[in-house]
Amino acid sequence: MATTSQGHFDAYEALDLTQVAKNQPWWRKFFGKETRSSGEKHSVATQLLIGGITGWCTGFIFQKVGKLAATAVGGGVILLELANHTGHIKVDWKRVENDMKKAKEQLKIRKSAQIPHEVKSKAEEVVLFIKQNVLVTGGFFGGFLLGMAS
């Protein structure tokens, strides 16, 4: 009986998905040769799940921290304005105006300068990471948006 069941399974051809992924990766055509095939990493579902869960957690935390930060900044501005109105704080408007002029001059100088090399290299590293981990980053961004919405 074992031979009849063995013969039954021989009628089907096994398809090795890792070989198919190595031979025909659609993302290499789209993102370039830096990406590795999914057979060399974790499964697609695992990558999407990890990216989605971490993205959702990050989005949820950003939402809560963002509300807290907005409340703190808004409350601080209201308290400072109240203290100014009641006379507890005196503002030296001439000094504020001089500081604003200095800040404008510094911004003009920095605007004419080019982007520093360190920033360019970090941006290239981020792009390379995204290209190598398309599924994880896609899952992360999807989860991040869901976390921000919840």
Image: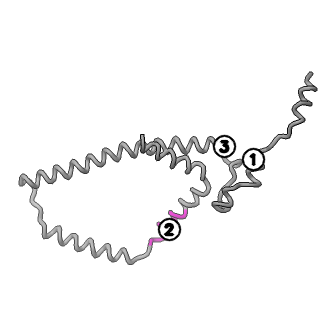
Residue 1 position in % (x across, y down): 92, 21
Residue at 42% from the left image edge and 45% from the top image edge? 148
Q: Nearer the viewer, mark 2 or mark 3?
A: 3
Residue 80: x and y, percent? Answer: 16, 53
Secondary structure of the residue carrying tag 1 is helix
Q: Earlier in the sequence, mark 1 or mark 3?
A: 1
Query: In this picture, which residue range is highlighted in magenta?
Result: 115-124
Q: Of the residues shown, which amino acid type is indicated by label 1? A: Thr
Residue named by callout 1? 18
3D distance between C-alphas at marks 1 and 3: 10 Å
Assess disc 3: are there few (<14), some (14-19) or many (≥20) residues with their C-alpha within 10 Å of its C-alpha.
few
Query: Mark 1 and mark 2 in contact (Cβ < 8 Å)?
Result: no
Q: Residue furthest left?
A: 87
Q: Amino acid at mark 3?
A: Ser
- Residue 43: assigned label: 3
Q: Nearer the viewer, residue 49 or 30?
A: 30
The mark found on residue 36 in the picture is none
Looking at this view, is 143 or 93 the one in front? 143
Residue at 60% over, 53% down = 134
Amino acid type assigned to the residue bearing label 2 in the image: Lys
Q: CA distance from mark 2 to mark 3?
A: 32 Å
Kindly identify which residue carries mark 2: 120
The dominant secondary structure in magenta is helix
* Residue 63: quarter of image: top left
Residue at image x 43%, y 75%?
114
Badge 2 or badge 3: first in the primary sequence = 3
Query: Does the stretch in magenta take in 120?
Result: yes
Along the horizontal axis of the image, is 3 left or right of 120?
A: right
Examine the rendered structure and indicate whether residue 101 appears above or below residue 80.
below
Q: Which circle, 2 or 1, is nearer the viewer?
A: 1
Question: Which type of secondary structure does the marked residue at label 2 adopt?
Answer: helix
- In this view of the protein, which residue sits in the foreground, 35 or 27? 27
